[in-house]
Amino acid sequence: MGRMENMEMMQKLQAENSSVNVMFVHMNLMDRVNMEQAVKQVMGVIKHIDVLINGAGVLADKDMETTMGVNLMGMMNMVWLCMPYMDKTQMGQGGIVMNIASVYGLEPAPAFPVYAAAKHGVIGFTRSMADKRHYQHTGVAFIVVCPGLTTSEAMMNLREKSVMGQQSYVGELVEAMDHAKQQSPVECAMNMVKAMEMMKNGAVYLCNMGQLKEVMPTNYWHM
């Protein structure tokens, strides 16, 4: 499910395994009703969900509603809509949810504070859903991957996207990002697959410069 159909990629994926059905369903993460319809369309073809990857993201701090809506609210809504088809006590058989955050979910992003807030939220939500009591009940594991700077459209025209862009010093922050080393999307994706295959409930991974590393957040309070 996504916003743009890529027929070439779909045909390539289908050719790799003719026994599966590769399909595309358009979905708007800012519209919960549309999301519900998309999930129902998918569930009309399959019986349950084994793996859910929430990878949609947008870097657009000047539009706070879209930044929070796509990066955080859309991800949470997708989890709620899919859980009945994953939860072993409902219609599912257990499985894994992988949410994509960012290195800016682990540390501040002075030029993009709204984006950082959303990505910190992704990590907080994922770790909360990974609580052992939830896992024992549902059989659904949750992990979160935090990519470092990755070559993509999101990395273009950064100053224009910053809600702080009118400040002269923000140019220095954006310039530092522009000149920082970036990993390729392929490198990042391969490490995401590795993280998912480890199936470690509650794990937080940093995926940066072709390397995958588990991050150990500090717990300050225990129930």
Image: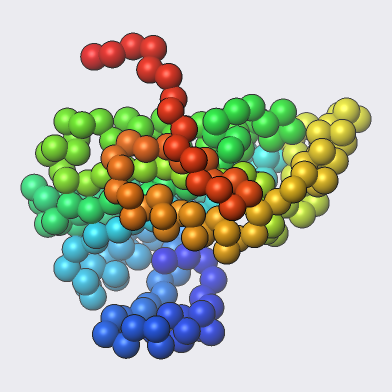
Which residue shows up at 51% across the image and 76% down it?
5
- Is 40 left or right of 78, judged from the image as shown? left
- Is 221 left or right of 154, judged from the image as shown? left
Q: Which quadrant does the C terminus fall into?
A: top left
Task: Work out whether residue 37 or residue 70 is closer to the camera in this orientation and state it.
Answer: 70
Check the image and name the residue furthest to the top: 221
Which residue shows up at 67% across the image and 40% down it?
61
Q: In the rendering, at what x and y percent does residue 14 appear?
A: 39, 84
Which residue shows up at 41% across the image and 55% down it?
194
Question: Compared to 24, does 108 lie above or below?
Answer: above
Q: Residue 173: which quarter of the image?
A: top right
Query: Would residue 31 be visible to someone looking at this image?
Result: no
Q: Residue 169: which quarter of the image?
A: top right
Check the image and name the residue furthest to the right: 168
Q: In the rendering, at what x and y percent does residue 76 appear?
A: 38, 43
Q: Which quadrant does the N terminus fall into?
A: bottom left
Check the image and name the residue furthest to the left: 89
Task: Work out whether residue 152 or residue 45 is closer to the camera in this orientation and state it.
Answer: 152
Q: In the rendering, at what x and y percent does residue 156 appear?
A: 77, 54
Question: Compared to 217, does 25 lie above or below?
Answer: below
Which residue shows up at 29% across the image and 81% down it?
20
